[in-house]
Amino acid sequence: MHPYTSMQNADIIAREDQRTSGTYSKRGIAIVRGSGAILWDADENRYVDCVGGQGSANLGHAHPAVVAAIQQQATQLISCPEIFHNDQRAAYLDELGAAMPVGMGRVFLCNSGTEAVESALKFARLSTGRPNIIAMMRGFHGRTMGALSATYEPKYREPFEPLIAGVSHVPYDRIEALAAAINDQTAAVIVEPVQGEGGVRPASPGFLTAAAALCAQHGALLIVDEVQTGFGRTGSLFAITQAGVTPDLLVMAKSMAGGMPMGALAIHERLGGFAPASHGSTFGGNPLACAAARAALRAILSEDLCAQTARKGTALMDALRSANLSKVREVRGAGLLVGLELKERVQPTLVALMQRGVLALPAGPNVLRLLPPLVITDAELAEVVTVLREVLA
Ligand SMILES: *Cc1c(COP(=O)(O)O)cnc(C)c1O
């Protein structure tokens, strides 16, 4: 038996709390095992997972193809910096290239969302020779200094100022505001197709198209941050294709490698790539992550998870709307990125759901966010709806 599985929630929590950093507010359960959309804690309590690894578990837990790829590759080669070529990386770049929006040419591989955003901001300054970045109010792009400069939430940003110069925020989904802000000093505009952390807010039809046109007109690059919306979450492999827009820079991470840490920046072919030695990452493009990412991408495509996600997301939102939950002001989302804006603070609801076996996320102070693995079954989704009706009626 694995040495830790004999420990119970209380033991694990007490031990971890001795040395954990303190930055996370924890839920008070120790998750030790998962399968599909189900998680178990150390006391064998079962949960339907609507946290989905905060967006990194689109394929669910212990997906057999991802498990097999990791096991197999671990016996061959785990680390291999990009000064060498590698078989898994070559194959993955090929397969990802074929699946991305048409015209995306080169790919910089890294290890997280924030690192992928950093690479996009650096590329934009390098490629345009301009200093300024326009980001969106309520946007979220990560927590390292560069990405944090583009993140909106003042409580994440202000304690760390001064951040990088030249970043401003305009209201999301308001094309006039972007038109007024963009000029010949704008290197890039960075935008999420659906704001995740910022409250689950899909862009209205036409906003992204108009933003792309403004960028083209002013010679600025459009950076589309698909860290949360990518890899099937909104019902297509990338949300941006639903808007019919080809980004200049496409940022991805979270579910890219079936739950393994991985991020990437894709660069439109007309922009070429990075100048030699202008950027880098030791772990970037490591064979283990690439092997997991190959298995994950193949599974998303072969299991038709995008179409299933569109169907399940619509059914879930219809069920939640027609339940007329008295504590809910609005249900919105795209695919299985679903937000319930509450008439009250979300924290007590998260606790009540957990006590009834459903794990969920907040998105700001009063929005409940559901981010289940895309492999969640209809029966499991029905279970979630039943519990939400109990808690929010
Ligand atoms: C989560 C997220 C990030 C940051 O990703 P990390 O891997 O946590 O650094 C960036 N952008 C968006 C849209 C995200 O949802």
Image (spheres, rainbow, N blue to C red):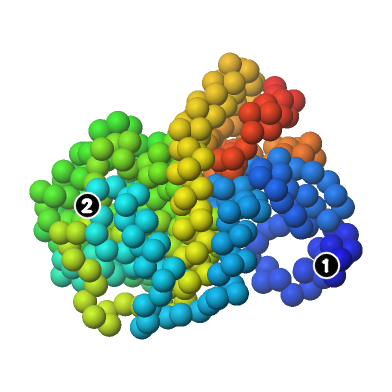
Give the labeled residue for mark 1.
2
Disc 1 residue type?
Answer: His
Nearest to the observer: residue 320 or residue 175: 320
Judge whether 261 appears above or below 134 on screen.
below
Residue 199 in the image, given as x and y percentages of width and height: 49, 41
Q: Which residue: 86% across, 66% down?
A: 1
Nearest to the observer: residue 94 or residue 143: 94
**Left or right position of 6 against 223:** right
Is residue 175 something one can see in this rendering? no
For label 1, the SS is loop
Judge whether 275 appears above or below 213 on screen.
below
Q: Label 1: how many residues lie within 10 Å, few (<14), some (14-19) or many (20+)? A: few
Q: Which residue: 59% across, 23% down?
A: 320
Q: Which residue: 22% across, 52% down?
A: 103
Q: Which numbered marker is on residue 337?
A: none
Residue 146 in the image, given as x and y percentages of width and height: 38, 68
Give the labeled residue for mark 2.
103
Disc 2 residue type?
Answer: Gly
Q: Which residue: 26% across, 68% down?
A: 123
Residue 76 in the image, given as x and y percentages of width and height: 55, 76
